[in-house]
Image: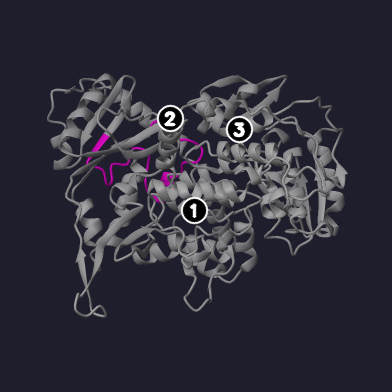
Amino acid sequence: MSTIDLLREAIRAKLPDLDMVLAWGGDDPLRASPLFIRTESDLENLAAPHLYVSNLAVNLYSLRSKKIGLVVKGCDSRSVIQLLKEGLIARPSLYIFGLPCEGVVDAAKINREIPDAGRATGLAVRSGRVMVQTPENEHILDLDAVLADRCLRCRYPNPLIYDQLIGEAIPVGEIPDLYQDLDEFEALSLDARHDFWMETMRRCVRCYACRNACPLCVCKAHCVADSREPHWLTLETNVSQKWFFQVLHSMHLAGRCTECGECERACPMGLPILLMRRKLNREIRELFGYEAGLDLMTTPPLSTFSIEEENIAEREL
Amino acid sequence: MSLVFLARENLPAWIGRLYQDMAVFAPMTINGVAAFRALGQDEIPDLSRIPASSPKAAVFPQTETLFTFTSRKHADDLSQVDIDLSYHLAEVPRVILGARPCDARGLKLMDPVFGGKVKDPYYLARRERTIIVSQACAMPDRACFCPGTGGGPYDPAGSDLLLLPVADGWLAQGLTEAGEKLLAQDLFTPAGDREPEAQSLKDKAEAYLAQAPDMRGAEQAFENLFKDEAFWDQATAGCVRCRICAYLCPACTCFNITDEESGLKGERIRTWDHCMSYMFTQEASGHNPRMQKAFRMRNRIGHKFCYYPQLHGGTVSCTGCGRCVRACPSGIDIRRIVESMKRKGA
């Protein structure tokens, strides 16, 4: 049986015990949408696995009073672990279908590669190639050129938490994330980095899609960015307010962010904002030897403290 | 009105001349995303893609100062304070270049909101000084549905000048006096026999959009479904309550007004608001009549496809530009919501 058939049958079997199952569906050939499966007929709308781009864990906090089935890729499973670890959701109300993932395609990259991608009628992935059909053309792209960035450095294609694994786990070697993108950026001068972020913020429309698509951003309506009392941010859409918000968002995710990339994927302006989260994650890794969402036992470093931190020489400051 | 031809290589020179007399708002592409902005000198827009944002900010900026205020304490009695107010209205003429026909119609939909019974001087000062140069859509995409809202990929409504794409440039069609004036340049040459080429692209674009669902006439269906919570719950299930759909929409007009002050000085500003956010209807008492996102989506759909058309002769407050569909991180498609509303609420 194909992965999608295995998944469909697994969901069908568990559906009677659950309020709903969150998976991916829809008719967009370049990306699947969240699919809320409540009845068996909804199962007909399941999309193909290479389109499972979004992280469905974003819905868990607001659905925490329900009995939810959730399909997770390896990267998504880390968000679930982090939410559980922070006590934001409860394990008993969750049934997890773990889906070993070979990578998902990034519609934004396809749009950059192909001028008429917006007219695509179909997409197929075969032996390292992606075929995109439009009314006028058939385009063939290298899969690596259009895989989501996070897939290119993926270390966890297999879910780290699940009740049921769909298909076989994917063998995975040791692939360290060397943060090459960050190294290249940090090699620029301070002025160049400043200019880069100011220009990026100029294009930001302050739509909060980055915040709201983030599975770990659970404050929602109580976000400091929306608060009028206290009045931390103004409602102006100038560069300084937008920069303030982006820095706040990144700081609040330090040691919590699993780098699922949903902030960047959701951005309607295509801004490279994951880079900021990665910067803080590397700091956390170097200071505390910690990565978010890998296990249920450890405590996130910013949720605790040691009298003397091993890698922070407080007394020498 | 006769057509004239603008060669693609003459576009920068034309923009350069426009730039001398007015602010030019046009789409710039960065990292594969085209968005409207006020061009700097010698910046050349990208007219090849459907812009991710609408050009409405040229007449309805995301943030605008209504007035500034300064408090002055009396030196002899510090409890006495005078307040100085100052404001100014936009004076700089502007041109929106590379709007799509759906964008031009979007501005037409905003006009009765800001220029109807109540006249909004800030909006009108900009609007009256704005010339709209639209580019017809030879390559609509699968998110487009303008014919379903009463428009079309070559619809001239609301534009001062319409550029019809041909292989090596555009045929320009002046639609108003202001638009015609922009053509009085040696950069434009007679169109000769190019019209059939433009016509053939128009026919193809219209054929591509022939299946667009009709978004009009849903007023009664909406009212019938108003209390159907399950319907609105399902329609909104994936929504993450961001503001993309309203901010990219060429027809959304809701705004907020706040005082942003520091010390004795401040500004009263108007900023875009968004109906999917919790704060939209949060009352000072703490009560929120639209607690759930489903109710907020109901309001969003109702506003566009029931309340607005009831006030404006059946015209929906949506131009089928497809921007909300393209950019929604959860893949929510407003066409599917209205279609199922018409089906279930019939």
Q: Calculate the distance from the C-alpha at mark 1 to the C-alpha at mark 2.
A: 30 Å
User: Given the image, what chain letter belongs to the residue carrying mark 3?
Assistant: A
Locate residue B233, reporting x and y percent.
Answer: 63, 62
Q: Position of B96 compared to A179: left or right?
A: left
Compared with A165, B122 (above or below) is below
Q: Position of B286 compared to B135: left or right?
A: right
Comparing marks 1 and 2, which lies closer to the viewer? Answer: 2
Q: Specify whether residue B141 is painted magenta.
A: yes
Q: Which residues are magenta?
A: B138-162
Q: Calculate the distance from the C-alpha at mark 2 to the C-alpha at mark 3.
A: 28 Å
Q: Do callouts 2 and 3 point to residues on the same chain? A: yes
Compared with A267, A178 (above or below) is above
Q: Calculate the distance from the C-alpha at mark 3 to the C-alpha at mark 1.
A: 22 Å
The residue beneath circle 3 is A106
User: What type is the residue that disc 1 sits on?
Assistant: Arg
- How dense is the environment of label 1, judged by Cα within 10 Å: few (below 14), some, or many (20 and up)? many
Comparing marks 2 and 3, which lies closer to the viewer? Answer: 2
The residue beneath circle 2 is A192
User: What type is the residue that disc 2 sits on?
Assistant: Ala
